Image (cartoon, rainbow, N blue to C red):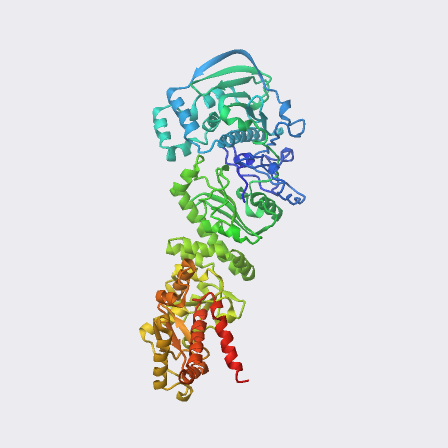
Amino acid sequence: MLPEPDLGSSWVAREGKGHSEPPRQAGRQPDRADSGHAQRRPRRGQPGGLTDRFSSAAARPSRPAPPSPPAGPQAAGACAVPRVPCSGRPAPAATAASTRPSGSLTGSSSTHEFQAETRKLLDIVARSLYSEKEVFIRELISNGSDALEKLRHKLMSEGKDLPELEIHLETDSKKGTLTIQDTGIGMTREELLSNLGTIARSGSKAFLDMLQNQAEASSKIIGQFGVGFYSSFMVADRVEVFSQLAAPGSPGYCWCSDGSGTFELSEASGVQAGTKIVLHLKKECMEFASEDRVRGEQLGLAALWMMEPKDIGDWQHKEFYRFIAQSYDEPRYILHYKTDAPLNIRSIFYVPEMKPSMFDVSRELGSSVALYSRKVLILTKATEILPKWLRFLKGVVDSEDIPLNLSRELLQESTLIRKLRDVLQQRLIKFFIEQSKKDPEKYAKFFEDFGLFMREGIVTIAEQEVKEEIAKLLRYESSTLPPGQLTSLSEYASRMPAGSRNIYYLCAPNRHLAEHSPYYEAMKKKDAEVLFCYEQFDELTLLHLRQFDKKKLMSVETDIVVDHYKEEKFEEHRPAEECLSSQDAEDLLAWMRNALGSRVATIKVTPRLDVHPAMITVLEMGAARHFLRMQQLAKTSEERAQMLQPTLEINTGHVLIKKLNQLRLKQPELAHMLLDQIYDNAMIAAGLNDDPRPMVNRLNDLLAKVLEKH
């Protein structure tokens, strides 16, 4: 299971706005701008998260310790790592929240009014923009990240050393406050007025009208400083902002508002360079003043999906996978997918090494892949980002095309998300096909463990084109290949003779039963390749698939019935003396019809059997089997026959049929017992009788009859 949203995930995934510098890659040598500074930068980390709906690493003692990284440069992102100790937890003195000056007001204060349009914007942002209150922390951490990035960029461009770049969280349950403080660029008085006094730097009526068209407009302004900040008023009835520009001699200021219509701006002393936001929480939101609700821990995890694949070590993938999957195993497959068309996508997907349990398979869960936009966490469990049949995957998807305020409701309705889901599904199918060619044995094991998900995809997805794409991942044994060797539908189609239109398959518990099935025996006369399907849901899967590459998927049982309706003739190749005469056969058929009664619709002679005495044929045998299993109906032979209308085809050259013809005249009672057993055997071979227990007594009687002569 992917952990719930982390504060660190919200921050660590985002660079400062206005900077296009990519994340620093693991193992990359510092360039000129980095020289002399890279060693001073802490490793990029992920601050802890909310442990109720949001979970933190600190609250998960069961998470395995990540493997020790090899010696060498640490993986790092675009800006320095914030360390986020939480009040009351052990922390170095340099980072303890209690050592941070809180600032005190000096000089006169000025009161400013929000514009009417701005008040409307504030109401929309605070009440309508987000579907979950927890996102306010995501936004405040993101703003702090931007401030750190701006300071880092400024100092590095000036060739100066980097200070400790950090973000701190402090909770105070007695005072009912939550404090978030960064050591970033800070703000001047004018910037406080501009950034916090006017939402998105626009108070125009036109902008308000645009914002109210939320699906389009909010994605354009949510990332701008000010809008995300105002999400804090969802949980706070008063917000204080202490800020000082990170420049020698700069004064400190305090911005304060209750979000109603005005804010105060005052000069303050004792303010540390950077920005400190103090949220005075509403009564109904006091949970965010609890350390148990908000916790922090430094984690050495980079945003791997933004890095170049060649720069990521195996140990980093293992560490990252274990964190997001909350598992002890290692990834079996890794797909690092990046593209700019048709959508901007940066993603990493992992296939677990551990085989899923039937409980995991049967649960109605969506994808546990995390969704980011511009490296800002949107959802840790974006259930709509992948189709359900791919829910076994773990990973991260980041797309700049996704609006940052995307709620779960919008996620389900978004055309953009559907397009993203289709692109990812297509790429993942392509990846698995590539892996099957690269290492067939490894893929065979993967299909054995996860094949049920693929079958589910074919059964549940409506589009035939998508069904056939997923079907490329299916693997079966074949009558023309050695036992244990698997083949795909594509490979089967490539071996088909010119003019062939059907892909034949036979469902059986194992190869031995398949090869000794009366239906496979009947197919041998066609000299056609047959796929052997052993899993419980193979038949249902192929029934839903219907066709592949313009070729019809047909079970061998159905093909036999189709041949019958086409009146295809199969010449008897055995000498006449080895079979019953035409007259004897007609008499036997009449007797059998009378004896079996309503249990069969028709009885006829077939020349397609050599080894078996008889077989049952039903139109759409696979569908009939599935229907019987699902409905739990037709408990008696008569009820079953009434539904199925089966045909009993007999082999008049078989010793049992010839002996039956003799016994019907000499020992009618024994003949009836033998006929019932032949019929039940045929029904069992057809998979239409799942409970053979009622015929045990008859078998005992038949054995006793046989032993009477000895």
Above or below, comparing residue 584 to residue 282 in the picture: below
Residue 462, placed above or below residue 406: below
- Residue 624: name its quadrant: bottom left
The answer to whether residue 433 is seen in the rendering is yes
For image coordinates 53% across by 59% down, the residue present is 448
Question: Looking at the image, is 275 positioned above or below residue 586?
Answer: above
Task: Between residue 545 and residue 314, name the one nearer to us.
Answer: 545
- Residue farthest toward the left in the current orientation of the protein: 566
Tell me residue 262's x, y (percent).
44, 17
Image coords of residue 658 (percent x, y): 42, 84
Q: Is residue 527 visible?
A: no
> Which of the pair 15/608 is nearer the observer?
608
Q: Quadrant of the N terminus?
A: top right
Q: How many marks?
A: 0
Please provide percent x and percent y for residue 236.
49, 24
- Depth check: give the residue in front, 489 or 312: 489
**Viewport quadrant of the C terminus:** bottom right
Residue drawn at the location 34% of the way across and 79% of the way down: 590
Residue, far top: 108
